[in-house]
């Protein structure tokens, strides 16, 4: 920002504008869209009030205007994102701020401190077994109660354990015609004349077990709880 103002001042003087020697020219403050200014001010007020979710929404509105934004907004937005646990976005914005503002930025020290906090958070998440890479706590999968396996009624026998004999179609006897045109009844060898057989899919177990479709066998699922990286989550 300062750099821009500085070169603007040089440009004015090189263009030969008359600038009073007694009263050195004060460069005008950079002009931002009034809507952007209002939104950024509102977001900062929300941050001060502790309403970081609200500040996040307001900053996003400012971004959506597609107008030129004050560089410092990157820092404030990064801080907001860090508080609401959007670590990756927070990292992107604080790095953007440091890149744009450099060491002369108004919030250089604060930005360095914030970047360190974000990096520490990433490290804690990486070393934590209780959360995913976004820092959300794992909870027991309620579909399988943490077993990773679900048991369901056999689709083939509808939970009966037996199915109609496919050879005699349930009659228990096989009917054939002799060359003399007589009907010959023989007992069904597949079902021992019972007319039904043990279900070949569940082998009479009536149920089928398989990998839990919700947790894909892990027994855990990601919650919307921000992990504290400790064995006991408060
Ligand atoms: Zn049979
Ligand atoms: Zn079955
Ligand atoms: Zn499961
Ligand atoms: Zn964790």
Image (tube, rainbow, N blue to C red):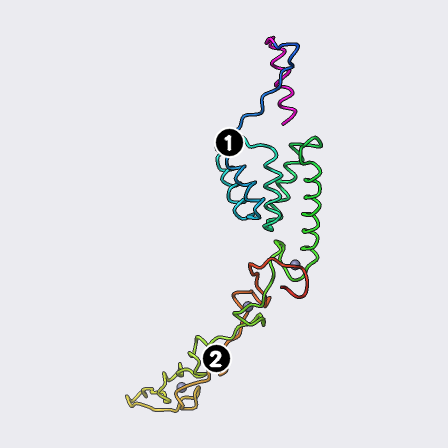
Which residue occupies 56% across, 65% down?
A: 216
Name which quarter of the figure residue 156 lies in: bottom left
- Badge 1 element: loop
Percent x, y of residue 86: 59, 49
**Front-most of residues 192 and 47:** 47
Compared to residue 117, the image places residue 171 above or below, namely below
Q: Any mark on residue 224, and which?
A: none
Compared to residue 205, the image places residue 70 above or below, namely above
Which residue occupies 69% across, 36% down?
A: 108
Distance from mark 2 CB to nearest ligand 2 atom below 8 Å: yes
User: Which of the two discs, 1 and 2, sits closer to the camera?
Assistant: 1
Compared to residue 64, the image places residue 147 above or below, namely below
Residue tagged by mark 2? 200
Percent x, y of residue 48: 58, 44
Q: What span is in magenta? A: 1-18
Left or right: where 16 falls relative to 127: left
Residue 89 is a magenta residue: no
Percent x, y of residue 141: 56, 67
Name which quarter of the figure residue 220 lies in: bottom right
Residue tagged by mark 1? 67
Main structural element of the magenta stretch: helix, strand or loop? helix
């Amino acid at each position: 920002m300062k750099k821009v103002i500085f070169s603007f001042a040089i440009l004015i003087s090189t263009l030969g504008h008359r600038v009073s020697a007694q009263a050195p020219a004060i460069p005008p403050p950079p002009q931002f869209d009034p809507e952007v200014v209002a939104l950024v001010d509102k977001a900062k007020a929300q941050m001060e009030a502790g309403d970081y979710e609200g500040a996040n929404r307001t900053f996003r509105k400012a971004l959506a205007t597609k107008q030129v934004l004050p560089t410092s907004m990157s820092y404030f937005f990064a801080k907001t994102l860090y508080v609401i646990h959007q670590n990756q976005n927070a990292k992107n914005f604080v790095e953007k701020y440091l890149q744009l503002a450099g060491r002369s930025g108004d919030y250089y020290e604060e930005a360095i401190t914030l970047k360190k906090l974000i990096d520490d958070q990433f490290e804690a998440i990486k070393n934590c077994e209780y959360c995913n890479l976004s820092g959300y706590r794992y909870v027991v999968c309620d579909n399988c109660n943490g077993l990773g396996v679900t048991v369901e009624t056999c689709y083939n026998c509808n939970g009966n354990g037996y199915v109609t004999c496919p050879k005699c179609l349930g009659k228990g006897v096989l009917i054939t015609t002799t060359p003399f045109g007589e009907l010959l009844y023989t007992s069904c060898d597949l079902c021992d004349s019972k007319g039904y057989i043990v279900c070949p899919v569940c082998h009479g177990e009536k149920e089928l077990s398989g990998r839990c479709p919700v947790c894909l066998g892990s027994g855990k699922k990601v919650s919307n709880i921000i992990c504290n990286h400790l064995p006991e989550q408060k």
